Image: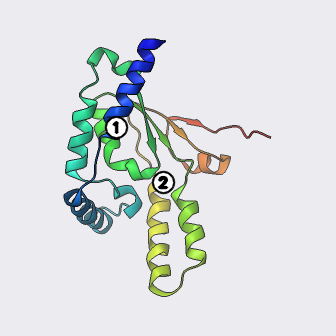
Amino acid sequence: SESELYKLNKAYKIIKKIDINFLDLLFIFFNALKNRIFKKIPLQASLIDSPLIKKKINSYLKLINEDEKPNYIIHCYSIRTYSIWKQLNEIKINFVLDLVDSMKLNISEKIYFLKGLKKTFWLNELKSNNKFESNLPNYKFLKSYLVVSNKDAKELKVNSHIIKPKPIY
């Protein structure tokens, strides 16, 4: 309907406005290091972890009226959005986690071509990532995980609904 298209357009404009500045980049860098060293969270899961970004996202999400929240669903693409999952759950917005672009696969392919310290660094990141992806948190407003393969679905130790897209031939 026309009102739904209006809402989608409004949501798109809101999300499009989220800019990352130099201060955000500094927060992201130091938070990623802190999370990696002390919490053993992969760097990939901390790429947008900044108090400033969280504040910006929260201010935009607050524009959604309470009575409209059940009609919204936020699509979180990859574990890189980890830092906002808890936030989405706390403000009671439905969301899905798209793990179709698995970090395990990306990092595994990257390691094949690396040598020396870079290879050691990425092997460590792969180990951390494997542990993280196989122990993903569950949230009340997390409606599903999107994965590509049965293997990925089996590795997820979650109680949420897992959606595996069917191939088109």
Up/down of 74 relative to 122, above or below: above
Q: Is residue 41 left or right of residue 51?
A: right
- Report the residue at 32% width, 66% height from top: 36
Say what amino acid the circle numbered 1 marks: Ile
- Report the residue at 38% width, 21% height from top: 7
- As helix, strand or loop, the secondary structure at mark 1 comes to helix
- How many angstroms separate mark 1 from mark 2 (CA)? 26 Å
Up/down of 51 relative to 126, above or below: above
The type of colouring in the image is rainbow
Up/down of 152 relative to 125, above or below: above
Residues at badges 1 and 2 in contact (C-beta under 8 Å)?
no
Q: Is residue 164 left or right of residue 63?
A: right
Question: Which quarter of the picture shows residue 27?
Answer: bottom left
Task: Pinpoint residue 42: horizontal percent, then vertical percent.
Answer: 39, 62
- Report the residue at 30% width, 61% height from top: 39
Say which of 158 and 81 sits in front.
81
- Report the residue at 44% width, 17% height from top: 4
Say which of 4 and 123 sits in front.
4
| Residue bearing the label numbered 2 | 133
Say what amino acid the circle numbered 2 marks: Glu
Dot 1, how many residues are within 10 Å of its Cα: few (below 14), some (14-19), or many (20+)? Answer: few
**Residue 142 visible somewhere in the drawing:** yes
Question: Which quarter of the picture shows residue 117?
Answer: bottom left
Q: Is residue 106 left or right of residue 80?
A: right
Task: Pinpoint residue 29: horizontal percent, then vertical percent.
Answer: 27, 65
Determine which of the numbered discs, if any, sits on residue 15 in the image.
1
Residue furthest to the right: 169
